[in-house]
Amino acid sequence: MSQPRLEVADVFRRHGEAWRAANAGRVSLAQRRVMTAIEICRTAALGGHVERCESCAHTRVAYNSCRNRHCPKCQWHAAERWLAARQAELLPVPYYHVVFTLPAALGAIAYQNKAKVYGLLFQAAAGALTTIAADPKRLGAEIGLTAVLHTWGQTLDHHAHVHCVAPGGGLSADRTRWVNCRPGFFLPVRVLSRLYRRLFLDGLIALFDASELSFFGDLTGLADRRVFLKYLAPWRKREWVVYAKRPFAGPEQVLAYLSRYTHRVAIANSRLVELTDDHVAFRWKDYRAKGRAKLMRLSPAEFIRRFLMHVLPDGFHRIRHYGLLANGHRAENLAQCRALLGEATREANRAPATEATPSSASADPPRCPCCGGRMMIIETFEGVFRSQSRKPRGFDSS
């Protein structure tokens, strides 16, 4: 696959130092680490190795990746392993794609309190799905779901929302039978939306009362409880956007879509069109105009600012599993579901893919671009960051 002509790294290398100087004191340590990681990714600064084809002796130098989870160039193997693991867990039932969006006015609070409010967004979305599904008047079943946090839109603005993928059914209350949802219908969207709204707003007030929220800039006044409650009041009456639809091409399509964003953020290098001293141009889709492709030009400073808005707190998990798919008992629950659904047992000698086990393809030596032979490592060399222990925090795949 050909390399993109432009990369986010090019923007950072060309304009990053000036941006840091202009924003001194307003850039978090996490954002600085991400910038540095992307700037030095696959350069001599991280070291690398020399490969030689065992057939034609073609030689090339390959530099190490930064492995930062925000880097547009890294984590593809991790994303592939994640996708393979999720596909291995698919049940022989329809799957549904549900998206829970946070209103923009509350997104500002989320941005200033990422760990707490993003975590609450997960809890409210999962709580709404599992509660409504367990209601005997709705589905009356224990369901499972995988949720992935996105914080960006097509133009890189802050747009916090959670994508959920869930099988169309679940285990009965006594766990003795599989309960299917109605054909083409998962759960009532309006009911989901209103419960999600209530769970989120109640949780946000609880965070405020526990002194776990901070407010800066234009939101400073919200530190007063009466002002805070008044600010939230209109959002108890407005409809919140929840989108639920069965994927037309099956669950594999949604999982493949999500896998492109599970191990990086904001924008792919392939969308970048032009970089100058004055602007960064990139392609985007205007979904208000039926997905029409457009070109956006931002100043380099604004592009960097928007990209770094989506840096997550250290240790924050942007992929979470709930209900039947919760990590603790996922294997047992899936086995029970398959048994109740009458699915044939998998071949004993074929273990399902997991995130911790690389695929066989990734373990094979790369092929020579000249003759197709195997490229073998003949030399390794170290860079500035000679070992993992010397790399700045954030140079990992967490």
Image (cartoon, rainbow, N blue to C red):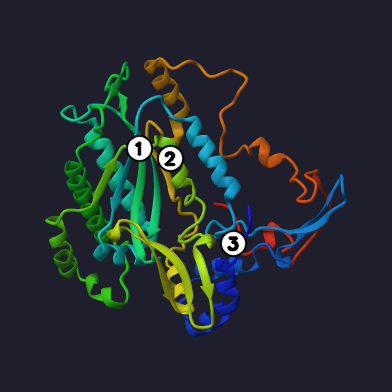
Of the image marks 2 and 1, the number of the one nearer the N terminus: 1
Q: What residue is shown with label 1?
A: 248
* Residue 104, image x, y percentages: 27, 63
Residue at 32% x, 68% y is 214
Q: Amino acid at mark 3?
A: Pro
Residue at 55% x, 66% y is 34
- Secondary structure of the residue carrying tag 1 is loop
Question: Relative to 142, does residue 302 appear above or below in the rendering?
Answer: below
Residue situated in front as seen by the camera: 36 or 258: 258
Which numbered marker is on residue 253?
2
Q: What residue is shown with label 3?
A: 4
Left or right side of 134 for 263: right
Residue at 36% x, 55% y is 118
* Residue 170, image x, y percentages: 31, 26
Q: CA distance from mark 2 to mark 1?
A: 8 Å
- Secondary structure of the residue carrying tag 3 is loop
Which numbered marker is on residue 74?
none
Tag 3 and tag 2, C-beta contact below 8 Å = no
Tag 2 and tag 1, C-beta contact below 8 Å = yes
Of the image marks 3 and 2, the number of the one nearer the N terminus: 3
Question: Relative to 338, does residue 221 appear above or below in the rendering?
Answer: below
Q: Quadrant of residue 237?
A: bottom left
Residue situated in front as seen by the camera: 2 or 326: 2
- Secondary structure of the residue carrying tag 2 is helix
Q: Quadrant of residue 348?
A: top right
